Image (tube, rainbow, N blue to C red):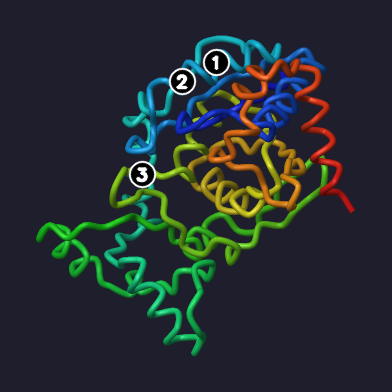
Amino acid sequence: MTVTRFAPSPTGLLHLGHAYAAKVAHDLARKNGGRFLLRQEDIDTPRVREEYYTKIEEDLKWLGLDWDGEILRQNNRQEAYEKALENLKTRGLVYPCFCTRKEIQAEIRRSLGAPHGLANHLYPGTCRLFSRNESMKRIANGETHAWRFDSAKAAIIHGELSFEDLRIGSNRVDIMVNGDAVIARKDIGIAYHLAVVVDDDFQKISHVTRGEDLLGSTHIHRQLQAVLGYTDPVYLHHGLVRDKKGIRLAKRDAARSIAQLRENGTSAAEIFSMAEAALKKDQP
């Protein structure tokens, strides 16, 4: 059975880009007689606002995108995430990282001889070099730390991997796309990469539909699926709805929010047409 999901974060209002993403997931499920699920990705608790849960649900219903079953809230799933993290810890597939962002950028500059502005470069693996005893001692002393996925060590276990995308075909997993990504943060605990993989398996998602800006994340998601013994879904990384300047829409763009457009008298059909038009402008 085709099972898709729409997984917004209740940290702001839905906009045109969300409307398009939700419709892609909804229509794929309905076309195949499957199920369309709604997941509220609310683990980033400092940014979550209670009113956005309701507004997201209201907007989707008004758009005619009804979901099946109960809504899953990630904030109620911490035990499942911790269990997965503990699995990875026990097998030595994660390591604690004590570095601050400033320290990481300084290390990248030293290793590459590069200038400032290196936010997108990969983590250099500084804390991977610590012995287990040293890391555990620092944790016992109360040092704050994140947990990073040891992608190279995981690759030894799972071997060559790939994932299928309905739009761009077969893709070979490249562990260098994300490097040793954070899967549990210092501030909020379990991070996006681990939570989304655990939930996709729990909800038996067969097709993951999302924007092409998350294509890179799929490489680490596929690794996590492999080492955790999860079934890998089929993907569809669709194009992005952008503004007139070609910039991907963000929640701060209140003028393009579904709520504001509704208030201005725009119909659901017109909203989808606007999203499609903005999407086509981004195509070659």
Q: Residue at x 34, y 50 (%)?
A: 185
Q: Is residue 196 left or right of residue 98?
A: right
Q: Residue at x 72, y 45 (%)?
A: 243
Mark 1 element type? helix
Q: CA distance from mark 3 to mark 2?
A: 27 Å
Q: Nearer the viewer, residue 171 or 215?
A: 215
Q: Which mark is residue 85?
A: 3
Left or right of residue 12, residue 166 in this image: right
Q: Amino acid at mark 3?
A: Leu
Give yes or no for contact between labels 3 and 2 (Cβ–Cβ under 8 Å).
no
Q: Position of residue 161 (x, y in %)?
A: 66, 54
Q: Quarter of the image containing the N terminus?
A: top right
Label 1, label 2: how many angstroms apart (C-alpha)? 7 Å
Rendered location of residue 158, percent (x, y): 56, 54
Q: Which residue is mark 2?
A: 53
> Given the current orientation, which residue lies at the most extreme left position?
141
Q: Nearer the viewer, residue 277 or 89?
A: 277
